[in-house]
């Protein structure tokens, strides 16, 4: 029995998160043993250039010395206290410097938790219960679950199966990049409009000019809150995320993935008066044993200091710009900052309906061709791939070369 078969005996599908199972591309995922910089190695010792970057967190690559040092120091000083620390003070200030709209912030353990907590604040602040989201936008497995979208047919069912029907009944769905589809809803009864200001799981799609501004205006007019779910695009499309890049200020922001440079984390924050609705100042309950633990917080401090170096994001963007050469090979290549997506289909993606047209079989063949050449891409078409500061332009050229070989039908062993 292979290691992956053994895993399947004791863990559903052999994975602790469904997309890791290669469900869309077929085949067996390599079982990984080690990562360093831009590379990972599987249990059989095969090396891959890692363009998954753990689905977002690894902006510095694997085992970056600054993160390793911060974690080692935290291990020696105690990893968790369940009491306030100065590290949290420093991190909250640093997050606010990067995201000035987050006047106050709470640290949690995952993006899903950040989203669930932000929505609870929004519902309490407005006294309304409905949430408006966008087709194909992903907000974690807890809230904002719509039956439509790529993930739904990916897993052969609705994302919301097993969730309370009350929850899904209160989730309205609009079309990304379409203000008209937002206006079709009764916004006066909506607590919050939540979106990925740059999307990840339906392809890396940037907001059309005016889209975020239009949402900002509509939310103000109808008294609903605007929530940017920057769990993926935060610290990826700019140090200050999409709100910095597109200069639109949300009421609440969710962060996660890259915030702690590879440790489990989430955060949500916004205007003081909204965040002060939370207990113990207000009466909205949100809590967690591991929230703000020093291991994670000290790693996040190290990560944010590294991300803040001058030229850090320009360099990341030069890597994805180099990969734009993939378009000449007929690939639907979309990139913002250090995020990019690949597919075969419409030349440009603007919303989930375009993404749905991507050719999955063709991507599956391409994916396995690349994997055989030692390039690890996301195992589903359109899903966000990432570069890190550990990647180089030479490695990007290697990706271009591998892609042109795969598309020319060359055998990987030659
Ligand atoms: C990954 C992701 C989440 C969920 O974060 P987890 O840490 O996996 O719970 C939420 N929103 C967006 C935009 C994401 O990309």
Image (cartoon, helix red, strand yellow):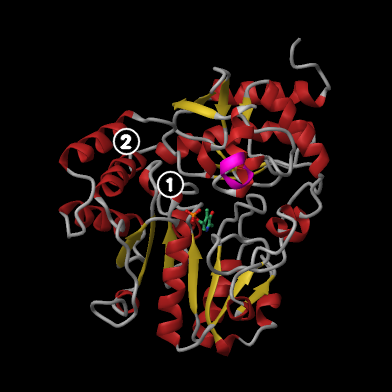
3D distance between C-alphas at marks 1 and 2: 12 Å
Q: From the image, tell me which residue sits under label 2.
A: 67
Image coordinates of residue 387 in percent, x first then y, are: 53, 35
Residue located at (26% from left, 58% from top):
92
Q: Which residues are magenta?
A: 9-13
**Residue 133 versus residue 186 in the image, above or below:** above
Say which quadrant the N terminus sits in: top right
Residue 52 visible to an observer of this rendering: yes
Residue 250 visible to an observer of this rendering: no
Residue located at (41% from left, 35% from top):
60
* Quarter residue 299 falls in: top left
Image coordinates of residue 79 in percent, x first then y, are: 23, 45
In-image side of 1 versus 213 (left or right): right
Image coordinates of residue 212 in percent, x first then y, are: 56, 67
Q: Nearer the viewer, residue 384 or 76?
A: 76
Q: From the image, tell me which residue sits under label 1.
A: 258
**Residue 73 versus residue 109 in the image, above or below:** above
- Mark 1 crowdedness (10 Å alpha carbons): few <14, some 14-19, many ≥20: many
**Total number of numbered labels?**
2
Q: Nearer the viewer, residue 365 or 174?
A: 365
**Residue 285 versus residue 238 in the image, above or below:** below
């Amino acid at each position: 029995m292979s290691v992956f078969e053994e895993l399947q005996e004791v863990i559903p599908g052999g994975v602790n998160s469904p997309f890791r199972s290669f469900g869309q591309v077929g085949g067996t995922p390599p079982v990984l043993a080690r990562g360093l910089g831009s590379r990972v190695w599987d249990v059989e010792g095969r090396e891959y250039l890692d363009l998954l970057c753990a689905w977002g967190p690894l902006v510095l690559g694997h085992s970056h010395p600054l993160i390793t040092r911060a974690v080692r120091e935290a291990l020696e000083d105690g990893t968790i206290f369940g009491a306030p620390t100065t590290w949290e003070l420093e991190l909250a200030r640093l997050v606010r410097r990067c995201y000035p709209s987050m006047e106050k912030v709470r640290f949690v353990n995952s993006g899903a938790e950040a989203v669930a907590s932000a929505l609870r604040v929004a519902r309490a602040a407005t006294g309304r219960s409905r949430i408006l989201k966008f087709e194909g936008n992903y907000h974690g497995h807890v809230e904002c679950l719509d039956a439509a979208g790529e993930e739904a047919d990916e897993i052969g069912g609705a994302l919301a199966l097993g969730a309370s029907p009350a929850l899904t009944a209160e989730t309205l769905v609009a079309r990304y990049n379409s203000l008209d589809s937002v206006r079709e809803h009764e916004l006066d009864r909506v607590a919050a409009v939540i979106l990925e200001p740059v999307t990840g799981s339906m392809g890396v799609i940037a907001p059309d000019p005016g889209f975020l501004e239009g949402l900002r205006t509509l939310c103000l007019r109808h008294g609903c809150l605007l929530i940017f779910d920057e769990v993926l695009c935060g610290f990826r499309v700019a140090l200050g995320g999409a709100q910095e890049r597109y200069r639109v200020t949300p009421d609440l922001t969710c962060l996660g993935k890259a915030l702690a440079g590879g440790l489990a984390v989430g955060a949500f924050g916004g205007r003081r008066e909204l965040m002060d609705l939370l207990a113990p100042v207000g009466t909205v309950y949100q809590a967690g044993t591991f929230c703000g633990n020093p291991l994670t917080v000290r790693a996040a401090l190290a990560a944010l200091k590294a991300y803040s170096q001058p030229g850090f994001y320009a360099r990341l963007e030069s890597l994805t710009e180099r990969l734009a050469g993939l378009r000449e090979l007929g690939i639907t290549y979309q990139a913002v900052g250090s995020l990019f997506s690949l597919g075969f289909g419409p030349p440009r993606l603007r919303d989930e309906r375009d993404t749905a047209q991507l050719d999955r079989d063709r991507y599956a063949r391409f994916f396995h061709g690349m994997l055989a050449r030692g390039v690890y891409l996301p195992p589903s078409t359109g899903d966000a791939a990432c570069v890190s500061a550990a990647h180089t332009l030479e490695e990007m050229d290697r990706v271009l070369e591998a892609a042109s070989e795969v598309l020319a039908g060359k055998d990987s062993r030659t």
